Amino acid sequence: MPKPTPPSPTRLLRVVALTIATAMVCATLPPQAALAQTDTPAVTTPEQPPEALNPAQQVDWVLTHHILPGFDRLAAQSATLAEVAASHCTPDDPALRDAFARAFDAWIAASHLRFGPTETDNRAFALAFWPDSRNKIPGTLRRALTEATRDTLTDADSFASQSVALRGFYALEYLLFDAAIQSEGSADQRCALVAAISADIARTSAAIRDDWHNSYAVTLVSPAPGNRYQSEAEIRQELFKTLTTGFQVLVDMRLGRPLGQFDAPRPNRAEARRSARSQRHIVLTLTAMEPLALALAAGDPALMQDIHAGFAKALTRASALDDPSLAGVADPARRFRIEAVQQDVSDLRSLITTRLGPKLGVTAGFNSLDGD
């Protein structure tokens, strides 16, 4: 294989010079009593890209203002979760639930970035085994709570070799919010499993962050023959695919699964319904994806304005649902509001596909969800 072309000093400086997005609160969801006996973190607006970015600057901006800060935040919040879980392991502990909420938020805000280090060793699935269409998580947890040895739960390599149904945020959600699982095994075993899952989340998140900083960041800004990406167009294709995958998850999974059919709604299929985070995940995802879409549209003010308006419409409606677990899909009087959100997101996806894709000269292509 030809030796990869090294990046220019200017590009390396851009990679190193990160800007961590901090901004005013954009939207706060309604109180979620079931989520925690603690305050739910507000959903904040990430940094927005400037209008004038040439194609090379678009990629640099997405890397330094969107991707790297997102995985830095995930690693930091997951490390805090692991630290808290080591000494606060009872399900209703406010400190544990708060740490869980903040780390889960950070994952959802970065979960559309399903390429590169997140796909290595199935890390995305290790963090987020959802949808669990065969209901594997509860059975796997029950076996672990009654049969797992101490070494399985305390040895990092041993735990990392376990089924993804035993790992990540959705398994931890069961332990913190599901009464049936909380009655399985002994208190000590449940405590050990909470700590083990939390530590595993922290290790996986740190591995993603480190791979981005140590190798993949340079890869993303160094297209050349023989490299992973041979042209700027291939990189834009990857980022556009990432965006369209995020919309696919929103429309078909986060909204489509619980909506089901009008005469056959499926509220129990709502994501993270036990912790009343279903609505929140929709808002978090839309909020996180907007800067990526705007950065790719930079240089076309009219398109940027239309994209921003589309996100604003969907976010306003999603934030106003007042339905944390999307239980309203089973109530005809409330269902239409959730369907309206789905339609807004579908319209936004159509705008991205029909106008942004041609502008970039790319198509959605296949993604990690295809064929699942």
Image (tube, rainbow, N blue to C red):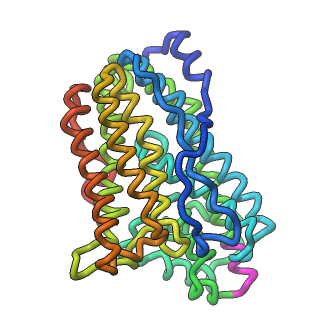
The residues colored magenta run 186-193
**Percent from the top left, x then y, of residue 18?**
60, 26
Q: Quadrant of residue 129?
A: bottom left
**Quadrant hosting residue 331:** bottom left
Which one is nearer the viewer's eye here, 215 or 299?
299
- The residue lying at 74 percent from left, 73 percent from top is 93
Q: Is residue 211 magenta?
A: no
Expressed as whole percent of the image width and height from the top left, the position of residue 128 reads 48, 60
Give yes or no for residue 189 being in the magenta stretch. yes
Position of 370 compared to 283: left or right? Answer: left
Question: Please, is residue 316 above or below residue 340 in the view?
Answer: above
Q: Nearer the viewer, residue 163 or 307?
A: 307
User: Which secondary structure class fits the magenta region best?
Assistant: helix
Counting from the top left corner in percent of width and height, residue 336 is at 29, 69
- Quadrant containing the C terminus is bottom left
Residue situated furthest right in the rendering: 87
Residue at x-position 36% and y-position 23%? 298
* Residue visible at 50% across and 10% down in the picture: 8
Residue 157 in view (yes/no): no
